[in-house]
Amino acid sequence: MELLSPAGNYNAFIGALNAGCDAVYLGGSRFGARAYADNFSDEEIIKAIKLAHINNVKVYLTVNTLIKEREYSDVIDYLRPLYEAGLDGCIVQDLGLIVRFRELFPDMECHVSTQGFATGIESVKFYKSLGASRVVLARELSLDEIKKIKASVDVELETFIHGAMCYSYSGECLFSSCLGGRSGNRGRCAGPCRLPYKMLDDKSGADKYLLSMKDQCTVDIIPELINAGIDSLKIEGRMKKPEYSAFVTSVYRKYIDLFMEHPDAYKVDKKDFEDLRHMYLRSEIGKGYYHVQNGREMITLESPAYNGNDDALMKRVSEQFLSGIKKQSITMYTSLIPGRNASLTFIQGEVSVTVEGDEVSTPLNRPLAEADIIKQLSKLGDTAFYAEEVYVEMPEPAFMPVKSLNELRRNAIEQLTDELSVKEPAQISPITFKGHKSSHSFVKKPIVMVHTKEQYDAACAFDDIYIGVPAELLLKEKISGNNIIAVLPDVIRIKDYGYVKEFLKHICNNNCCAVYVRNFEALNIIAEGNYDLNVVVGSEIYTANKSAVEFIDDISDVHAAPLELSKHELAECYNDNTYVFAYGKLPLMHTANCVLKTSKGCEKHKGNPFVYFKDRTDTVFSAYRNCDICSNIIYNSVPTFLYEELKESRFSMERIILSFTDENASETRNILSLYINGAGEYPDKFTKAYWKRGVE
């Protein structure tokens, strides 16, 4: 059982180390999902690795952002010296880096970030088959789901136990980047979920924080988490102060140890719980999704503000955990015999090193006193050690300059540090994934994604297009045909496996030309099930660099480019299998919670599947309620519209995606006529989204 603590800077690292973490995760100067944390220089990372290993603690580096093509060689060059310095593992989001990780860094652990959107057995199996040694599960999973994954896949599992919660599935949020260019997939989320919103049909006049999740605190269910088989319990908080990392680590260390040693005596002290509440937690807290699927009780509707911090507690934590480096005791043996080279042995635990120094001489005047030798060798300063015992072998009077004794001590410290800094052998998974491609050819032509029957009917009037139909609509309306692409759910959980597999059998037998997949759950189900279907990979499976593109091309027919790429970044990865999002409201969030259920209560399958809410500027967003799988997709207020840009670019108008959400039949026909026939009206309001600016 590993307790994994955050470190936003070196001082926070010291605090977590002193407080008893088993491992620490930290970000460097680039490629981490907390770009606005203080983060570590390369030199500080190497220093932290050495100190952590001396204390039998592991260090994981966050590389949990999407890697653009022009950055791909840079990230490898960035990681190489850290890998050689003994870095234990990397927490990775980017598919293009994951698929080459074993080749590039064969002795380092690859941990798939929670940004990797692992929601069930199939996605975890998929990542393991690519060589991942650990998967950080989506925060939305229940304890029952985690137990099933653990029983089904032999790979380490990591989950969050404390700190801030995202409203969207991690890795599936474009809200911040679409509104202001700061992408969560690039470590720069501006937190729009913490702003107030109001449902359009709410007559109360009061704004609510509809998307603001309560912070997580699970100290009272630690026994359940351990019994579920979770391998690593992770504390969120690299953006928070060192006192937070130190204190929260100390509390969870206390209760993990209590349960492991005295399970029947497990009880959380009220004082500890209250202190946790006053250490950078929001005004309302919960246990996350471990015991609930979703609901109003998970949201800080009235205020997302933090509780005030207890100054006395902060001072106590600082004095206890942040006042210096945790030191390890060592035993010293020195031999000083005239006519021989001096020797010094350091023993720390089961590790010992011996170094030799200058020759010891017979004293002409004052010989060395044993007390002086002990005093000089014990001067370990700001190293990670203190001398517990010093034994001196000096059978006859001897002399050695203080300078030589100091050099002997320094050499021994350096050698012991190097010896203790050697990392443990990494837990490596072999690469076993084998994709499956259909025996049928796939002719490239525009893909029209619909949500409603009237949009589908409007699209049927146009030739030479594919129509992407959601599973629930396809089954309800008994839709089939050789121009139909069956669209699988945006989120697939274990409870959905039977439904998905039956649906895949259905479309195999009912003349659909392809299946549209938006997650690795679906991709792995198809690969292992040998369904003879053409596969279209959606933009939610990010292909931000050529490495990812090449991998996806090997296991699918075509793929949609990531939505956050600019036209120039898109051109760097574009090939004959790439589709470009040309029209539609961008999906800003894929969520396990439901804005309607939060505001009014559950109205499953009742009324319009789209509900609307607005922000403080009266910008209106829509949320699609997929009641079959109990999830929401939140869409942008206006459609992305790239008709002119694509006409004048090198990108093929044959390989575009037109996505309709809440448009009526007339609006659908108009846009299709414009893109397909070149005759139609432009929408009244639209955005170019990422076309020119991309994201940082």
Image: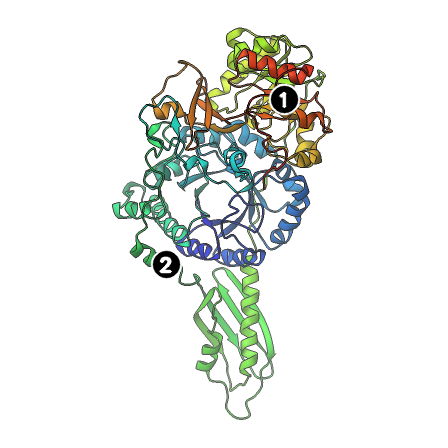
Total tally of numbered discs in the picture: 2
Relative to residue 14, is residue 585 depicted above or below?
above
x and y percentages locating residue 277 in the rendered image = 31, 45
Residue located 30% across and 52% down the image: 310
Whether residue 401 is visible to the viewer of this picture, yes or no, is yes
- For disc 2, the marked residue is 318
Relative to residue 603, is residue 179 depicted above or below?
below
Q: Is the Cβ of the residue at disc 2 closer than 8 Å to that at disc 1?
A: no
Neighbor class of circle 2 (other Cα within 10 Å; few <14, some 14-19, many 20+) is some
Residue in the foreground of this view, choosing between 485 and 306: 306
Residue in the foreground of this view, choosing between 535 and 264: 535
Which image quadrant for residue 341? bottom right
Residue located farthest toward the bottom when viewing the structure as drawn: 365
Which label belongs to residue 44? none
Residue located 64% across and 46% down the image: 75
Amino acid identity at mark 2: Ser
Residue in the foreground of this view, choosing between 332 and 300: 300
Relative to residue 249, is residue 678 depicted above or below?
above
| Of pointers 2 and 1, the one earlier in the residue sequence | 2
x and y percentages locating residue 612 in the rendered image = 43, 23
Amino acid identity at mark 1: Ile
- For disc 1, the marked residue is 657
- Spatial CA distance of label 2 from label 1 is 55 Å
Q: Quadrant of the N terminus?
A: top left
